[in-house]
Image: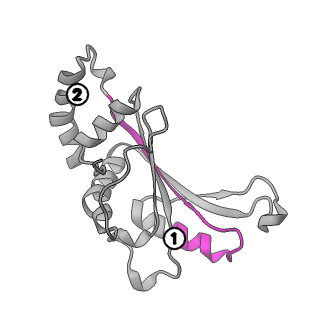
């Protein structure tokens, strides 16, 4: 069974974008390609910090995260080469649409004093990146079982050629942008 948001994309978003921009080919219409969720952990913390972040990230995304290790030793940061410093998950297809749906419908509205995300955080190629300061906004995380609050970065990669096309795609998908 396809994700609910994918059906919305096919039935509502594609015709609206095609009509507005007069795309000739169906493959010109912007679409979500992948969502990357990244949690960085301070190198000064103990090793269990990376394990806790990986466990939380697997609960949030439903996928096992890849643990990222440092490439170089940096003495000022107390960082050694090969030391685990974070974890990331790349979501595609159905898992991506399910995560996007849960993010928009359940997690983002739980942020305190949430008035929408800034529409100015596009990278110039149609990709949107934003940071979440606390993992407890996701309903899958139990407040009693977390040891430390951990933030994360979420990158939404689209096939849009420009930022305006990507902004329009995400707005039609229901992404909560702040109004000026």
Residue 13, image quadrant: top left
Q: Position of residue 115 (x, y in %)?
A: 29, 59
* Among numbered discs 1 and 2, the one appearing first in the sequence: 2
Front residue (pair 139, 174): 174
Mark 1 closeness class: few <14, some 14–19, many ≥20 residues within 10 Å: some
Q: Is residue 153 visible?
A: yes
Q: Position of residue 69 (x, y in %)?
A: 69, 58
Front residue (pair 146, 91): 146
Q: Position of residue 107 (x, y in %)?
A: 32, 64
Q: Which residue is mark 2?
A: 17
Q: Which residue is mark 1?
A: 150
Residue occupying the far bottom of the picture: 144
Check contact, mark 1 vs mark 2: CB within 8 A.
no
Q: Secondary structure at mark 1?
A: loop
Front residue (pair 120, 14): 120
Which residue occupies 57% across, 59% down?
87
Query: Could you tell me how far apart the alpha carbons at marks 1 and 2 are, in whole angstroms?
Result: 37 Å
Which residue occupies 30% across, 49% down?
177
Q: Is residue 2 visible?
A: no
């Amino acid at each position: 069974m396809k994700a609910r948001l994918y059906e919305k994309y096919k039935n509502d978003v594609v015709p609206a974008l095609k009509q507005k921009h007069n795309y000739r080919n169906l493959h010109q219409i912007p679409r979500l390609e992948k969502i990357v969720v990244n949690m960085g952990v301070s190198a000064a913390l103990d090793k269990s910090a990376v394990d806790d972040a990986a466990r939380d990230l697997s609960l949030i995304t439903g996928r096992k995260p890849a643990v990222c290790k440092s490439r170089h030793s940096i003495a000022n940061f107390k960082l050694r080469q090969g030391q685990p410093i974070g974890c990331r998950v790349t979501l595609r297809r159905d898992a991506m649409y399910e995560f996007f749906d849960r993010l928009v419908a359940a997690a983002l509205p739980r942020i305190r004093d949430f008035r929408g995300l800034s529409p100015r955080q596009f990278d110039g190629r149609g990709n949107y990146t934003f940071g979440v300061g606390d993992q407890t906004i996701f309903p899958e995380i139990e407040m009693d079982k977390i040891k430390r609050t951990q933030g994360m970065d979420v990158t939404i990669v689209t096939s849009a050629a420009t930022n305006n096309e990507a902004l329009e795609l995400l707005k039609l998908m229901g992404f909560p942008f702040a109004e000026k």
